[in-house]
Each structure stands twice: as structure tokens, then as C-alpha cells.
Amino acid sequence: MYSYLLEELSRAVGARLLIQFDYSGENYIVEPHLVGVNHHNQDCLCAWFDSKKAPGNTAAGWRCFLFSNMENVKLLDDRFCKKRPGYDPYNSSMNRIYYRI
């Protein structure tokens, strides 16, 4: 169902491209680190949210975004260059990992 989104987000992870999208009425710009399936069998993106890149949102940190709630997804030309603190490439909240840094 979300194959195109899976392909685009996996490409963003591999190329370390920032992603912009709407989620639950808020606009986010994030650094994607991992794409997979959570324990509820929902496709999701684990990403670092930098509040400086999207004023008005909550504090910076790790977020998990469900594909089903993501709208207007855009891969940006801007890149990020490092893994963020606390990144776990074997994220225990995932049943399956499709793509990771």
C-alpha cells in the first residue's frame, strides 16, 4: 500500500536527505535514520527531529512517524552528515527493519 513511500523514504535514509512532511496537523523537517515495521505491524519512520528547523513544534529528539499519517512528503536537497545521539540501528520497537543508516 505504501510501496512508493517506502521507496522514497529508504532513498532518503541512504542518501541522508532531510524529509519534510505534514503529520497530525504539524509540519516536520526530519533526519531519517530507519524505516521499518513496528510491533503493531505498521510501517513507520524513525527520525531525528530538530526543532530549530521547524519553529513552533516541540523539543528536538527521536520521533517515530507512521506512514499512514504522513502527508505531502518531500525529499529535500539538504543533507545531514552524522548519526544523532541515542541512535540504535537495531531499534527494539521494530519487528522488521527495511532500511537504516
Image: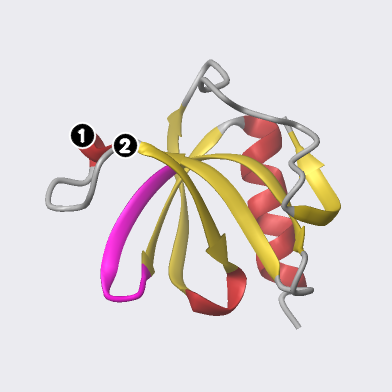
Kindly give the residue lying farthest to the left in the view shown.
56
Q: What SS does tag 1 mark? A: helix
User: Considering the numbered disc 2 on the image, is that residue within a helix, a strand or a loop?
Assistant: loop
Mark 2 vs 1, N-terminal side: 1
Q: Distance between the Cα atoms at labels 2 and 1?
A: 8 Å
**Total residue callouts:** 2
Q: Position of residue 54 (x, y in %)?
A: 22, 46
Q: Badges 2 and 1: C-beta atoms under 8 Å apart?
A: yes
**Which part of the image, by quadrant, shows the N terminus?**
bottom right
Residue at 53% in and 36% down: 17
Which amino acid, by three-letter code, is at mark 2? Ala
Picture residue at 74% right of the left edge, 41% below the top: 91
Which residue: 74% across, 74% down? 40
Q: Which residue is mark 1?
A: 52
The circle on residue 60 is: 2
Magenta residues, start to end: 23-30
> In the displayed structure, does residue 10 sit left or right of residue 20?
right
Q: In the picture shown, does residue 56 fall above or below 68? A: above
